[in-house]
Amino acid sequence: MTTSAAHGSPVIRACGRTAFLVELPNLADVLALHAELIAHPLSGQMEVLAAARTLMVRAATERDAARLAEQVAALHPETHDRQQGPLIEIEVCYDGPDLDRLATLLGWSRDAVITAHTGQLWTAAFGGFAPGFTYCVAHRDLDVPRRRTPRTAVPAGSVGLAGAFSAVYPRTSPGGWQLIGRTAAALWDAGRDSPALIAPGTRVRYRAVRDLVQTTTLTRPDHPDPARGLRILTTGPQSLITDLGRPGHADVGVAESGAMDRGAARLANSLVGNPVALPVVENLGGGLRVQAVGDQMVAVTGARVPLSISADSRQHTTAAQHTPTAQHRPHCEHAIRLMDGQVLTLGVPEAGLRSYLAVRGGIDAPGLFGSAATDLMSGIGPSPLRAGQLLAVSATRWASSPQPGARPRPLPASGATVGIVLGPRDDWFTPGALASLLSQRWRLREDSNRIGLRLDGVPLERSRPGELVSEGTVAGAVQVTTAGTPVILMRDHPVTGGYSVIGVVEAADLDTLAQLPAGSTVRFERSGDDTVGARNHVNSPSTGRLDRDG
């Protein structure tokens, strides 16, 4: 059975230069449009992400975004009964910490809550903030309030309710849903052909059980050390394997991730003759020491760090015992030859924050969705590097002779000014708040990381109360917390969020932000002509530009 969707022009809200939100009357219309764009993708369409009231569309270029906004606004797909997709049964032990309190809140019995959850079919509507976390909507009305105070850690396998949705937490993470039970089902398994157990469109039935059967995963035997590569001696504050990321999988909760400073990562690979997308090491704050196993050619870019090359350290037991044989100042235009046994040390950055180490041939690392990048938010990708680890290097992927290069842009000193495109939710703030956003010098906090850069300053005042229903986000989105302070979402950001986004930092400025240490200042400068290309379809004050050539 089909029914016509409510017609009328949807609201198009720009979300940076290459993405936009389509605001629709209800979830049924969102799912209908999502299904249409998945089944018949438009030229230039990179990704679509459904949420409760919006659909986010990401395009390949700015020109594509402008054209797609026009085309999507003209679509009127029909809504369908949600009876398609595979059926998955999930066993639940209903002993959640919120079950009795929720029953009292709803005026029901404990058994009535369980019956409401198990007695109907649920349909996976859209992905959430983590891989495998999928919002499932009921086929009969159910409206459950969130907890007033979110938990800092919800155990993996917890089954929760919030609003009209049910979901299972695939891994331990913060959350404000009402927890009614737990399951042993593996919601996310990178070893499966389809890692997410519940993907959009899947039908879900919950079944009550007294006890859960725990499954164990067989560990694979360790592989012998490769014949050649880079031995990690020390990692510094943090060292990760990364590349240019995994775009196009937000539907199952997977962010693009990838190198914080994309330009520096590309340059490091170019300097040693690699394709620019091969994995590299991202080091935070210096302190990385690697030893060549076999002769290697490497390059270090990004932060300006003192480099030293020492003789074979296999004769020594501590870092203090090795004697440097050469000192090198990095200028980001030369490859460095490391002979077998030599040790390369990255000192404390003199400018910038993150360095990128590439090795000719590329680092062999397991991939998921075409990327070996470590995503700290979701836990996808290789674990952070550890001392003693040997990174294998492939000699079969050499692409060309090492190429000369130069740092793509100057490193920031004590602060930076970055461009911002207002929207999609700038209309949630007073005119004074918009002026304050652009006039302040915001201070970068110590607890900033790859997920988001937290800023301190005079709080911004909202023009409307209430909560925003979660919707899609992009790297560079400037979310404003309930306390009124901005957080700039970075590479490992959650794919959806419920804080209002006042604007999106220009993509070209994300590399600069990646190199800012804590205590630096950030100033936002509104980008020129930031009007939406499909302006006739927009009936909100959001002003993010989509009409300039990409």
Image (cartoon, grey):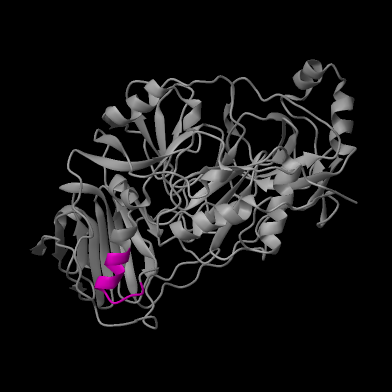
Q: Is residue 378 visible?
A: no
Specify start and end residues of the magenta stretch as a single range: 266-275
* Residue 512 appears left or right of 278: left
The kind of secondary structure the magenta stretch mainly shows is helix
Instruction: Indicate yes or no whether the magenta region holds residue 274.
Output: yes
Residue 87 in the image, given as x and y percentages of width and height? 84, 54
Residue 211 vs residue 298, the one in the foreground:
298
Q: Residue at x 78, y 45 (%)?
A: 5
Q: Residue at x 37, y 66 (%)?
A: 390
Quarter of the view holding residue 218: bottom right
Q: Is residue 42 above or below residue 253?
A: below
Q: Residue at x 60, y 56 (%)?
A: 71
**On-image quarter of the C terminus:** bottom left
Residue 465 vs residue 229, the one in the foreground:
465
Q: Is residue 334 above or below residue 386?
A: below
Residue 469 in the image, given as x and y percentages of width and height? 62, 33
Instruction: Indicate yes or no whether the magenta region holds residue 209.
Output: no
* Residue 24 appears left or right of 315: right
Q: Residue at x 75, y 26 (%)?
A: 144
Residue 113 in the image, given as x and y percentages of width and height? 84, 27
